Structures are given as structure tokens and as C-alpha cells.
Image (cartoon, helix red, strand yellow):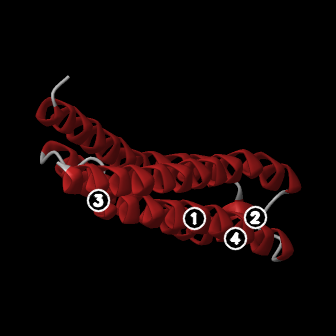
Amino acid sequence: MKQTSLAKWLKVVLFGVGVCGMVVYALVLPKVGQELIDGREELQRYFWPWLVFLWGSGVPCYVVLALGWKIAGNIGADRSFSLDNARLLKEIAVLAAGDAAYFFLGNLIFLFLDINHPGVVLFSLIVEFAGVAIAVAAAALSHLVRKAAALQEQSDLTI
């Protein structure tokens, strides 16, 4: 597969993920939340704190999509192994780890404020584990891309 074609496919996938995320954050979460509290007066006060918390967890995800878009552009410009891509991947790792920490701490705070259930906290560990896994993978890719960029620079200088 050519670099330009790979970059186009990456951008299509990133755009699709962004649209799916918008549908989830803008339509599905409010609808499901509203259905959960309908007819349950004691749960009414939980709706907005949880919705704002979940929307907040989506912000780093969209920053990551923007950084991924830049990486796809670099790949299309035949700069796959560049220090810029290594830096962008490191930023993705930091954002993923930060989002996982935000989600964990938010769930704990909600638990202590008595607007969360211990089962939800335990289930949220799956999401937090996924965030940490993405952070580790992005950090490893950043390291490898940085090493490849150094090798490519040495190779370019010897020719």
C-alpha cells in the first residue's frame, strides 16, 4: 500500500471514529441517562454531574483524533519516521494516561459523594485499563519511531 493511500485510509477511519464518538456523546449518553432516571426521583440529581463527567472524558479523545490526523498527514507526506510523529505519539500517550486517571479519580470522587455505585467503579476499571494500554502502546510506538527517525537520518547522511 502506498503512503498516500494509507494516509487517506487512516483519515477516513479517524473521521469515522470522530463521527461515531459525536453520536455517542451527543445522542446516546443523554438518551440512556434520561431513560435511566425516568420515573426515579432519587436518581434525578445524578444526571447532569454524570453527563458532564462523561463529556469531559471525551475531550482528550478528540484531541487524540486531531493528533492522529496530523500523523496521517505526515505519513502521506512520506515522513512516517520523523521526530514530529514521535512527539505526537508521546502526546497521545500522555493524553490517554491522563484520561484514564481522570476517569478513575472521577469515579472515586463520585463514589465518595454517594452518586456512584461500587459495581460501576469496578466496571470502569475496564475502561481505565484500556486507556493505560493505549498509553503504553503509544509510548512504545513513540520510542520506536524516534529510533527509526534517528536511523533514517544517519542513513540519509551517509548516502
In space, the residues marked 2 and 1 are separated at their CA atoms by 29 Å
Marks 2 and 1: which is nearer the front? Answer: 1
| As drawn, 24 above or below 8 | below
Q: Earlier in the sequence, mark 3 or mark 4?
A: 3
In the rendered structure, which amino acid carries the disc numbered 1?
Answer: Asp
Q: Which quadrant would residue 59 be assigned to in this image?
A: bottom left
Where is mark 2, residue-wise? 42
Mark sitting on residue 99: 1
Amino acid, disc 3: Ala
Cα separation, mark 2 vs mark 4, equals 21 Å
138 or 51: nearer the viewer: 138
Instruction: Reply above or below: 144 against 42.
Output: above
Locate residue 132, reporting x and y percent.
65, 54
Q: Nearer the viewer, mark 2 or mark 4?
A: 4
Res 106 → quadrant? bottom right
- Look at mark 3 in the image and give the residue it sits on: 66
Labels 1 and 4: the sequence-earlier one: 1
Q: Label 4 belongs to which residue?
A: 106
Q: Residue 71 in the image: x percent, y percent?
A: 27, 52
Sooner in the amino-acid sequence: mark 2 or mark 4: 2
Looking at this view, name the residue that lies furthest to the front. 158
Neighbours of disc 1 within 10 Å: few (<14), some (14-19), many (20+): many
Q: Residue furthest top?
A: 1
Instruction: Name which residue lies at 12% across and 36% down.
Output: 4
